[in-house]
Image (spheres, grey):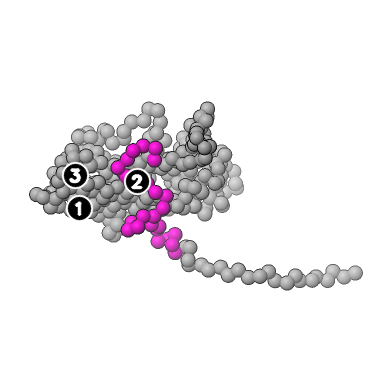
Amino acid sequence: MKNQSRLSAMMGTWTVNADVRLDVGDYGMETYVVLNVMCDPLKSVNGCEGCSEINNEICLRDDVGSTRCGSMVTDISDWSDALLYVYFGVRLHAGYPFNKDELYSTGGWVGPYSMIFAQNETATKNNGTLLDSYVLRYVQTPAIPYLRMDPDNTLMTYNDFDAYFGAGAVEYTTHLQNQLNGPNATDPFEKYAGNCDNGSVQPYLPILYFDFLKDQKNGVEKLNVRLDYRVLVFPASTDTIYSLMPKLQSKGFPFSGPYCYDDDPNRGWTVDVSYDSMEPSLASLVHSCVEGLPCTPPGSDACSTCIEIEIKAPGKATTVHVGR
């Protein structure tokens, strides 16, 4: 049974950011990914339980209220636990002799993506420390085909958006998501490394893991958060940054690659913004907004202020005469 208090603890804005500067030479990188998780009001109308969400199943309800276990990959759901919005940016700086600055950003919020809080009950069995465990699973909904690219997006062209953040990315992620953290998990980027035998590298959407742990010293419950996300960048071969990427990687920047992109085995790179609150990291994660970075999607701000509900005192009772 899902714990509603713990689900509430996962809502809100999560910000991962890193500022990496080399102590030799004028090289630096600033990167951030902001994730905003909010409740989906449709859950209260159409939601149901009883399926193995950790194994990509989702409970579906038909027109007469009967339920069945469907697939997060192939079935369209009319409900989810939460909605996710994503905002990403990275600025690369290479000093003399290159004197080059590059900014890659989504330019605005991307979403909403419909998510399920899949409870990993197997992980908590016979584990005295791990109290509860959840992972965000993507589901297909009628709204997914309407995901749109912000006009200020500098990460990609319009033609790339579908596979990067749109419906194509959701479909690919639903196929992949239950394989990413298993005992036999493999790196899904590996088959694209240094060759184009499998076509262009395919990115997947950010995956969040939440583990609720019992502190062995004082018994207090604490939350461990893990983010699995590698953001794909693919500078044109005519850009200075194209030839700089291997050099920046060799100097310790959190890049992986190169991967095949558009028939070029050296064009695709990922900015690795994965994070685990239990492990040392170049990045930091906070469950809040960070000054100077995006905070909440415009829709959430508008919905909190667009309606004012006046609260009045209850009216006087009405006496109904029923006769003698």
Q: Which amino acid does label 3 sit on?
A: Asp
Residue bearing the label numbered 2? 284
Circle nearer the viewer, 3 or 1: 3
Q: What residue type is labelled 1?
A: Glu
Whole-percent x and y of residue 250? 18, 38
Q: Distance between the residues labelled 3 and 1?
A: 20 Å
Task: Identify the mark nearer the N-term, 3 or 1.
Answer: 3
Outermost residue on the right side: it is 324
Residue bearing the label numbered 1? 102
Q: Nearer the viewer, residue 24 or 36?
A: 24
Name the residue: 44% across, 59% down: 300
Q: Which of 159 and 252 is in front in this view?
A: 252
Residue 185 drawn above or below residue 34? above
Do tag 2 and tag 1 residues touch (Cβ < 8 Å)? no
Residue bearing the label numbered 3? 23
Residues rendered magenta in the picture:
277-302
